[in-house]
């Protein structure tokens, strides 16, 4: 009688599908990336960062050291090593055709990075990230240089945030 008109079958199928869905969802684990159970903060604090070659790379490095340790300074006993190569490119995007001079521009700070285990050299994560900072070019030369430097610093800070997120995700999976 229950299955004779077809409505009971569809209700039974819906009920079984609901039970199966609940079973599948019960197997899922959702946890915060920076939870204390994963130990991600301690792992981040044990990452050493390669020495910088120029001012912008040093800015990215300083921001990463601060982000990794929460202001605690560089890692003393490093379990992981982060190798970085940072490049900066400044482009004028809005040109004054009468004076043939750029009035606004874009500073792109990009980095190739490679995270390895310090003892074995095994690569845990690698990639390329970039951050863009917009800049206005004033007519005074010193002001223009200072505006470019400020844009490089903003781009370096944003790039450090992106790299930290990538490294934290890689270390949380370990």
Image (cartoon, rainbow, N blue to C red):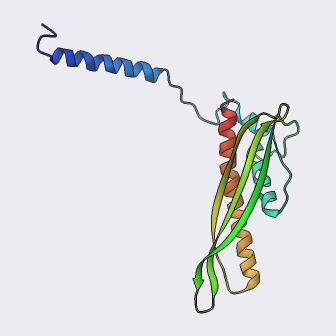
Image quarter of residue 25:
top left
> Looking at this rendering, what residue extends furthest in the bottom direction?
98
Report the residue that reaches farthest toward the right. 76
Q: Residue 157's x, y, as percent?
A: 70, 57
Image coordinates of residue 163 in percent, x first then y, are 69, 48
Q: Is residue 69 above or below residue 155?
A: above
Q: As displayed, is residue 142 above or below residue 9? A: below
Residue displayed at 76% across by 57% down: 86
Residue 164 x, y percent position in the rendering:
69, 46
Quarter of the image containing the N terminus? top left
Query: In terms of image quadrants, where is residue 75?
Result: top right
Q: Identify which residue is drawn at 71% across, 52% down.
A: 160
Along the line of sight, which residue is nearer the eye, 121 or 62? 121
Q: Position of residue 111 (x, y in %)?
A: 72, 54
Which is more toward the observer, 170 or 147? 170
Question: Residue 22 or 82: which is nearer the viewer?
Answer: 82
Asked if 164 appears above or below 117 in the picture, the reply is below
Query: How many numbered discs?
Result: 0
Residue shown at 65%/44% (left/top)? 165
Location of the C terminus (image quadrant): top right
Q: Residue at x 49, y 21 (%)?
A: 27
């Amino acid at each position: 009688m229950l299955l004779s008109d077809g409505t009971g079958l569809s209700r039974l199928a819906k009920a079984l599908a609901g039970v199966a869905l609940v079973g599948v969802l019960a197997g899922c684990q959702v946890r915060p990336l920076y939870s204390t159970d994963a130990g991600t903060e301690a792992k981040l604090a044990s990452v050493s960062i390669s020495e910088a070659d120029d001012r912008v790379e040093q800015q990215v490095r300083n921001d990463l050291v601060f982000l990794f340790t929460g202001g605690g300074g560089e890692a003393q006993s490093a379990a992981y090593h982060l190798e970085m190569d940072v490049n900066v490119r400044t482009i004028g995007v809005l040109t004054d055709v009468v004076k043939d001079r750029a009035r606004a521009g874009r500073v792109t700070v990009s980095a190739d990075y490679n995270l390895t285990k310090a003892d074995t050299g095994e690569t845990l994560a690698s990639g390329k990230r970039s951050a863009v900072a917009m800049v206005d070019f004033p007519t005074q030369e010193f002001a223009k240089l200072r505006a470019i430097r400020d844009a490089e610093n903003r781009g370096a800070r944003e790039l450090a945030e992106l790299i930290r997120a990538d490294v934290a995700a890689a270390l949380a999976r370990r």
